[in-house]
Amino acid sequence: MSNAVSFLTRTRRPGRIGLTDILSWVWLIGGTLAVLIPVVWAAMSSLKPEAEITRFPPSLLPRAAVQVEVQGYDKPLSLWKAPIDGMEREMAMVRRIGLKAQMVDPANPGPPVSVDTREITPVQKLTVATENFTDPLTRFSFLTFLKNSVFVTFVATVLTLIVNAMAAFALSKYRFRGEKAIFVLIISTLMIPLTVVMVPAYLVIVGVGLVDNLWGVIIPTVATPTGVFLLRQYMLTIPDELIEAARVDAASEFRIFWRIILPLTAPALAVLAIFSVLWRWNDFLWPLIVLSSRENFTLQVGLNAFEGEFSVQWHYILAMTFLSLAPVTVVFLFLQRYITTGIAGTGMK
């Protein structure tokens, strides 16, 4: 705790607060709030009943209208505070027509009384709508979507690390004609928009018979120029003498790569793993194009199924979106200590 306090109160000049310190605090606090507020709002809204999500003005805490059983009515009626005979009383709403509401006294029901809807307020209580989470897990195919996303993310990340690490090893530790031209060509693909290569990539997937297959989502995304650049720049910091010493000891090239290069490149691999997990987990457009069967949908495509032509089930979307943040958050927390080391090391030689 003392380390956190000393970090937060640290200034550029000990004992003095300057303009740089104020701007730094404003930037950090503002950035934190900009990221945190939408997440907190989504989390609180995922606990609200369906009718409360679209209520205006909105409330932060999950609340729901109080329902009461009224004699003579088959269904429970919502409870409202309404001015009746100059006094504010709790009345049950029978129906609502335009700006008028028909209301009865729940304790002594009689003929409905017409009340102006602009003068009534709902009686609410704190309510956690657990059905927002349980319904998709039991009634819909959310677990199937989750399983597919985990499979795609895990396999694609492992293949991305292996393929990009091998390419980076060849471009950083081998000298051959055209190596710089190949590296420039790989980096130049960063400037090509995804929409340009999407049609040719889809035609290739159709040609090899991987349409509506999870491998059709995985394979085209394995090789990334960002990963090659990140790992190559980091591998350039590894002394060539280590590789020469291993060759003197009769180590094969694959063993050098597997036993020497990969362990020393762990920080950069961790950074690329975080990027890859974020890319694959949040990918929507490419799986939407390749996949057509509901049992093969990934999580992001499956969430789109809750959005109909005339209505959107926001309570399910918010609940499942918040639940889908958990795996990515766990991966980030586990690998975050490598981010600074991995990115900072790519600029050294």
Image (cartoon, rainbow, N blue to C red):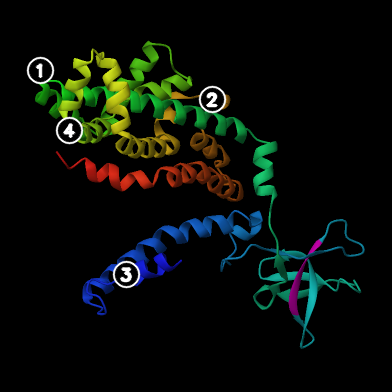
The label nearer to you, 2 versus 1, is 1
Relative to residue 170, is residue 86 depicted above or below? Answer: below
Relative to residue 183, is residue 11 depicted above or below? Answer: below
Asked if the stretch drawn in magenta spans residue 8, the answer is no
**Tag shown at residue 296:** 2
Disc 3 secondary structure class: helix
Residue 123 appears left or right of 333: right
- Of all residues, the one furthest to the front in this rendering is 249
Going from N to C along the chain, the mark reached first, 4 or 3, is 3
Q: Give the Cα distance between marks 1 and 4.
A: 16 Å
Q: Give the Cα distance between marks 2 and 1.
A: 43 Å
Give amino acid for label 2: Asn
Assign the magenta stretch its main secondary structure. strand
Q: Magenta stretch: give its range.
A: 77-82
Q: Residue at x 23, y 42 (%)?
A: 345
Going from N to C along the chain, the mark reached first, 2 or 1, is 1
Disc 2 secondary structure class: helix
Going from N to C along the chain, the mark reached first, 3 or 1, is 3
Disc 4 secondary structure class: loop
Give amino acid for label 3: Trp
Q: Give the Cα distance between marks 4 and 3.
A: 36 Å
> Which residue is denoted by mark 4 in the rendering?
236
Going from N to C along the chain, the mark reached first, 1 or 4, is 1
Asked if the stretch drawn in magenta spans residue 79, the answer is yes
> Which residue is denoted by mark 3 in the rendering?
25
Other-residue count near label 4 (Cα within 10 Å), few / some / many at <14 / 14–19 / ≥20: some
Q: Residue at x 8, y 20 (%)?
A: 178
> Which residue is denoted by mark 1 in the rendering?
176
Relative to residue 282, is residue 30 depicted above or below? Answer: below
